[in-house]
Image (tube, helix red, strand yellow):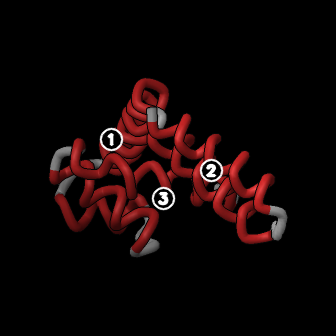
Amino acid sequence: MEIEQIIKISQLYDFYSDLLSDKQKQYLNDYFFNDLSLTEISENYNISKQAVSNNIKRTILELEQFEEKLELVKLNNERLFLLNEIKKITDNNEVLEYVDQLIKLEN
């Protein structure tokens, strides 16, 4: 799996993990954050490797659907971008423009 995909899943997990079941959290934690293989996870939970794989795929899809509907990651990334831009500038008018954009994101 590519690093960009792992970062995306990590962000989604950070924002939406409370909406997942304990089992979904355990499988994702084991696979992405504890670096366990599907075989190791299946042995730990006494289920088939295919069941673990299917559960992880469904959970990722569910996280992506949460983001489609709620856009929390997108909004957070936009905020971070604007804040970083504010840090770069010294002109007060430019700062005000970016602050206005941040306020619009909040509404």
Label 1: element kind: helix
Of all residues, the one furthest to the bottom in this rendering is: 34
Give the mark, 2 or 3, whose residue is nearer the N terminus.
3
In this rendering, does residue 70 appear at all? yes
Q: Nearer the viewer, residue 51 or 72?
A: 72
Tell me, yes or no, whether the two marked residues, 2 and 3, touch with CB atoms within 8 Å: no
* Residue at 56% in and 41% down: 74
Left or right? Give the position of 45 relative to 104.
left
* Amino acid type of the residue tagged 3 in the rendering: Ser
Q: Quadrant of residue 36?
A: bottom left
Q: Nearer the viewer, residue 86 or 75?
A: 86
- Label located before the other in sequence (3 or 1): 3
Counting from the top left corner in percent of width and height, residue 94 is at: 80, 53
- Vertical placement of 79 versus 61: above or below? below
Residue 37 % position (x, y): 44, 66
> Which amino acid, mark 1?
Asn
Q: Where is residue 79 in the image (x, y as percent from the top left)?
A: 58, 51
Q: Is residue 61 visible?
A: no
Q: Is residue 33 left or right of residue 90?
A: left
Which residue carries the number 3 mark?
A: 10
What label does residue 12 carry, if any? none
Q: Could you say where residue 82 lies in the image, as x and y percent from the top left?
A: 68, 54
Q: Residue 99 carries which label?
A: 2
Question: Separation of disc 2 and disc 3 at Cα?
Answer: 28 Å
Q: Please give left or right for residue 18 compared with residue 104 in the image.
A: left
- Position of residue 62 relative to residue 48, above or below, is above
Q: What residue did someone put label 1 on?
A: 55
Residue at image coords 53%, 42%: 103
For label 3, the SS is: helix
Hey, what amino acid is under mark 2?
Answer: Val
